[in-house]
Image (tube, rainbow, N blue to C red):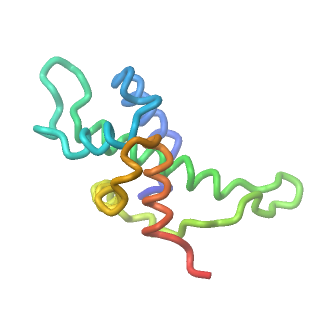
Amino acid sequence: MLRSNKLTRLVVVASLLMAAGRYAFGMTSSDLVQRCRGAKMQYMNDGEVGDLQFCEGYVLGITDTELMHQTEVDKTTLKPLHKKFVCMDDSIPVTELVLVYLKYMDDHPALLHTDAEMTVWNAINAAYHCPK
């Protein structure tokens, strides 16, 4: 699921983040945790992105971007350009990724003031780190 139609999913995620306006960029981990645990977790009636959709889009966007980065290859040798750190099944639902993130933040409250992008990636890396 994570690898199917990645371009389409990234366009959707980018659209969700743009629709969410000021919350998407420069967001602290505390802000994202609040949105992931958000009140109604549903689409809002006035056309804004609801907390659940924003949270899932943000977490999935960071995860997919980092996973795609891991699969970059040299165009002449076809050898990987980056070491693979995260090994995850393509069928992992985004709701699981959100729960992994929230658990990570519960375990690391000192990181609440830091950038959300980094803590999402740290959470995914910790939960799905490749065996040595």
**In terms of depth relative to the viewer, which is nearer, 53 or 102?**
102
Query: Where is the C terminus found, in terms of image quarters?
Result: bottom right
Identify the residue at image location x=31%, y=37%. Answer: 31
**In terms of depth relative to the viewer, which is nearer, 127 or 114?**
114
> On screen, 48 above or below 118?
above
> On screen, 53 above or below 131?
above
Residue 23 point in image, percent of width and height: 36, 27
Identify the residue at image location x=60%, y=66%. Answer: 85
**In terms of depth relative to the viewer, which is nearer, 123 or 98?**
123
Identify the residue at image location x=45%, y=64%. Answer: 90
Left or right for 31, reference 117: left
Left or right for 86, reference 31: right
Identify the residue at image location x=40%, y=37%. Answer: 28
Q: How many marks?
A: 0
Furthest residue toward right: 76
> On screen, 129 above or below 40?
below
Furthest residue toward top: 46
Left or right for 18, reference 49: right
The picture quadrant where one finds residue 47 is top left
